[in-house]
Amino acid sequence: MKWLLAISIAFTVFSAQAKDNQKDEYPKEANVYGYMPTQDGFELLVESNGCTDKSSFMMVMLESFPVQMHVVRKVADTCEMERHLKKLTYTYKELGLNQDSQFYLINKLQVTSTSQLIQ
């Protein structure tokens, strides 16, 4: 009976650790804190610890009408600066969209009151 209890506890701990490790796996949905259309595309506000740039993300687009766009973080930002928001600018051309293309962002907008915007 003691062995069964020990195995049960070990399995529970292992399962909890596995779930925690899954949170840090990439690629994963990006946390988007803002969206602003521009004449040539749009700007996104995303989390950064100092090493985030456009190459940290990929845009996954579902060809529908309107196009559904999902921002996915490819790699973790492992720098150790204070967490802040970073503005990334995308053009319609680099995303393969026409200027008059209709699309919407699938990511839920996040809310924060402690982050600072840097450009």
Image (cartoon, rainbow, N blue to C red):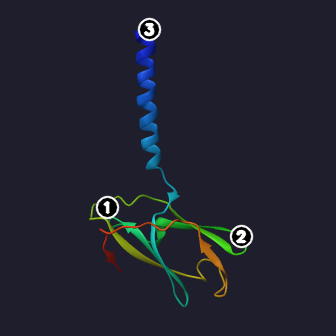
Residue under label 3, please give it: 1
Residue 24, position in %: x, y?
A: 43, 50
Residue under label 2, please give it: 63
Viewed as shown, does residue 90 lie left or right of 104?
Answer: left
- Which disc number belongs to residue 79? 1
Instruction: Name the amino acid, label 1.
Output: Cys
Secondary structure beneath label 1: loop
Secondary structure beneath label 3: loop
Instruction: Name the amino acid, label 3.
Output: Met
Q: What's the distance in space between the residues labelled 1 and 2, CA to CA?
A: 35 Å
Residue 86, position in %: x, y?
A: 38, 74
Quarter of the N terminus within the rendering:
top left
Secondary structure beneath label 2: loop
Instruction: Give the mark nearest the N terminus, 3 or 1.
Output: 3
- 45 or 113: nearer the eye? 113
Residue occupying the point 33% across, 77% down: 118
Residue 67 at least partly seen = yes
- 76 or 7: nearer the eye? 7
In which quarter of the view is residue 65 placed? Answer: bottom right
Instruction: Name the amino acid, label 2.
Output: Glu
In which quarter of the view is residue 78 placed? Answer: bottom left
Residue 52 at least partly seen = no
